Amino acid sequence: TAVLDGMFDAMKKGNMDEMKNYITKTDVAMLEAAEKFMNSVDPEGMKKIKDRITDEIKARTKTVEYSLKNEKIDGDHATVEAEIVQHLPDSVGGEKKSTHTFELVKEDNTWKIALTKPGNEMFNSMKGNMGAEKGDLKEGIEKLQKMDPDSLKMIIRKGLQAMDSMDKKKNEP
């Protein structure tokens, strides 16, 4: 469970590099390959996206409490459930509760979160919110790499415009 504690702590700090310490080497390699590819297409857009993702992770985890339960170990594989309680802003009130199952893999004698395992719903934002029954991170990155760079750059820009628009609406009285 230390790996999940470390991941949540890194998320609360918005420290993307530290988060990589808690995921498998394969997942780190895939995320870095995607980032490198996106940087080659649109470095400015990629920086803005990365900054926004970091800010969003920090904001969402700022008011989160969690408890870990039902840890099941089977050799070099394990699952653990996290009961998540997110305290909503005063303007909304209340709290949002959910349960997420994480798949862990032992690498170099250390437990790591396996993002490419379909059960890790908590990290769907990193997988394009595709859900457990859909494609995984690896598939998504492969699709990105096959896209026409100009089309991808246009999608990045449109995505950033949409985020700007949502931010403006969020800040309107």
Image (cartoon, helix red, strand yellow):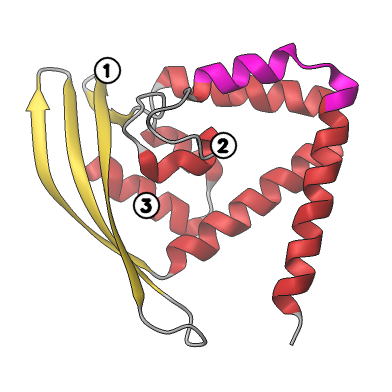
Residue 118 position in % (x across, y down): 36, 27
Q: Name which quarter of the figure residue 173 lies in.
A: bottom right
Q: Which residue is mark 3?
A: 8
- State the SS at label 3: helix
Residue 78 position in % (x across, y down): 17, 28
In the image, is residue 9 above or below residue 136? below
Q: Is residue 29 visible?
A: no
User: Mark 3 Cα within 10 Å, few/some/many (few <14, many 20+)?
Assistant: many
Q: Name which quarter of the figure residue 156 lies in.
A: top right
Q: Is residue 33 left or right of residue 39?
A: left
Q: Is residue 24 left or right of residue 108?
A: right
Which amino acid type is shown beneath numbered disc 2? Gly
Point out the frontmost of discs 3 and 2. Answer: 2
Residue pictured at 25% horizontal, 23% vertical: 105
Which amino acid type is shown beneath numbered disc 3? Phe
Q: Which residue is mark 1?
A: 108
- State the SS at label 1: loop
The reply to whether the C-beta atoms of the residues labelled 1 and 3 are less than 8 Å apart is no
Q: Is residue 143 magenta?
A: yes
Give the magenta part as a residue range: 138-151
User: Mark 1 Cα within 10 Å, few/some/many (few <14, many 20+)?
Assistant: few
